Amino acid sequence: GAVVSQHPSWVICKSGTSVKIECRSLDFQATTMFWYRQFPKQSLMLMATSNEGSKATYEQGVEKDKFLINHASLTLSTLTVTSAHPEDSSFYICSARDSRGRNYGYTFGSGTRLTVV
Amino acid sequence: QQPVQSPQAVILREGEDAVINCSSSKALYSVHWYRQKHGEAPVFLMILLKGGEQKGHEKISASFNEKKQQSSLYLTASQLSYSGTYFCGGGTSYGKLTFGQGTILTVHP
């Protein structure tokens, strides 16, 4: 089956520092990955679509200079939260379309809980 | 635009049935259903790709009414393990998935 590995599972960082989150497709190639953010008791909000070899597409209201996305290979996408502030604290999850076909939906990484202090 | 789910929360006893609805103001290419447990990533339940399509797996099934841009998830004879937050996702032809606000399902013994 399709497995998406996300690291780290949690991170605590100081305000003003940058944090990188990795998302890897382990047994398939993902030309497109999606990054979501989820605040407590809320839905998953799509932040951006990560495209291998090209620029990411950001959703309205998401600062592309703050949330840097790099998709340098067919199995790895990274999200860097730059100059993090407490309001960036959230649960960040990546996903990729299951390579087995459309009937299998999307596979999600296990998520990264970011706490900015 | 985000799909709208109803109800916001459901409380059941084991063995009871539930229906969760999802509607969209935009035309949907596909409808996805996921379940998320607290602190975990969403888990894929099923996808509906065509209007009129109905699918099921064990005691969970779903339907998609393309004309009304509505989908429903049916949970029959609920089990304790069904507890969690259920999200519907509206998919576009290029793969973008937008989630509804979620429905919290709690199953009690």
Image (tube, coloured by chain):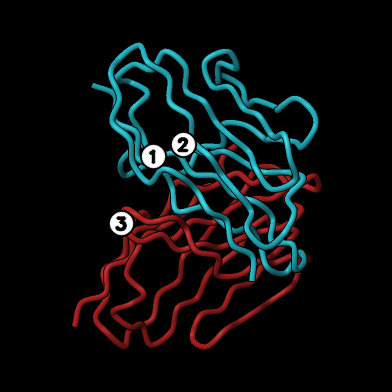
Chain colours: A cyan, B red
The Cα atoms of the two marked residues, 2 and 3, are separated by 15 Å
Quadrant containing the C terminus of chain A in the rendered view: top left
Residue placed furthest toward the left: B109
Front residue of A99/B101: it is A99
Residue drawn at point x = 55 percent, y = 19 percent: A61
Counting residues from the start of the chain, the first of labels 1 and 2 encountered is 2
| Place of residue A100 in the rendered image (x, y in percent of width and height, measured from the top left) | 75, 68
Dot label at residue A37: 2
**Quarter of the view holding residue A91:** top left
Amino acid identity at mark 1:
Phe
Q: Is residue B8 left or right of residue B96?
A: left
Quadrant containing the N terminus of chain A in the rendered view: bottom right
Front residue of A94/B23: it is A94
Relative height, residue A82 to residue B34 (above, below): above
**Are the residues under marks 2 and 3 on the same chain?**
no
Residue drawn at point x = 45 percent, y = 46 percent: B101
